[in-house]
Amino acid sequence: MLDIERIKKVIPHRYPFLLVDKILEIDEGKKAVGIKNVTINEPYFLGHFSGYPVMPGVLIVEALAQVGGIVMSQEDNSNHKIGLLTGIDNCRFRQQVKPGDQLLLTFEVTRVKGQIVKGKGVAMVNNEMVCETEIMFAFSSI
């Protein structure tokens, strides 16, 4: 399990764009499960949407990608690389995510070719799927 301080040592994202609060389980280079606690204090709720706050789908995908970055960053324990999003395929949103929800984020690596990683991400709230997608990213030195 990784708490927020350990996550910040593994990936370079910071508030307001760090979208993973905890990693519950990790199988380095293969799979991880994380949590994002969605609160009304998130800056995007000011305008998405006024009077009807809904977490933007693109941020759900970003949270899944961050879990994927954690999976691969753990493998070589390097803080000198960053995963850059290169593709999103077969993305489907099934439910809305609202303040008070807790996203359970699972990322499973399906292919690694050099610096390119592809995996399947699934986001759940209360045991119901809210998003599923395939995400591809490339690691680059920073």
Image (spheres, rainbow, N blue to C red):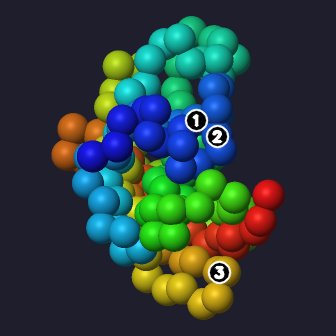
Locate residue 29 relative to residue 56 in the image: left or right.
Answer: left
Disc tally is: 3
- Asked whether the beta carbons under mark 3 and mark 2 sit within 8 Å of each other, the answer is no
Residue 13 — which label? 2
Instruction: Kindly give the residue lying farthest to the right in the view shown.
Output: 142
| Residue indicated by mark 3 | 116
Q: Position of residue 35 (x, y in %)?
A: 35, 39
> Which residue, as the protein is rendered here, is positioned at the far left?
127
Location of residue 119 in the rendering, given as x and y in whole percent from the top left corner? 48, 74
Identity of the residue drawn at 36% across and 35% down = 3
Q: Which secondary structure, mark 1?
A: loop
Tag 1: residue type?
A: Leu
C-alpha span from label 3 to label 1: 22 Å
Tell me, yes or no, whether the two marked residues, 2 and 1, touch with CB atoms within 8 Å.
yes
Q: CA distance from mark 3 to mark 2?
A: 20 Å
Query: Neighbour class for label 1 at 10 Å: few (<14), some, many (≥20)?
Result: some
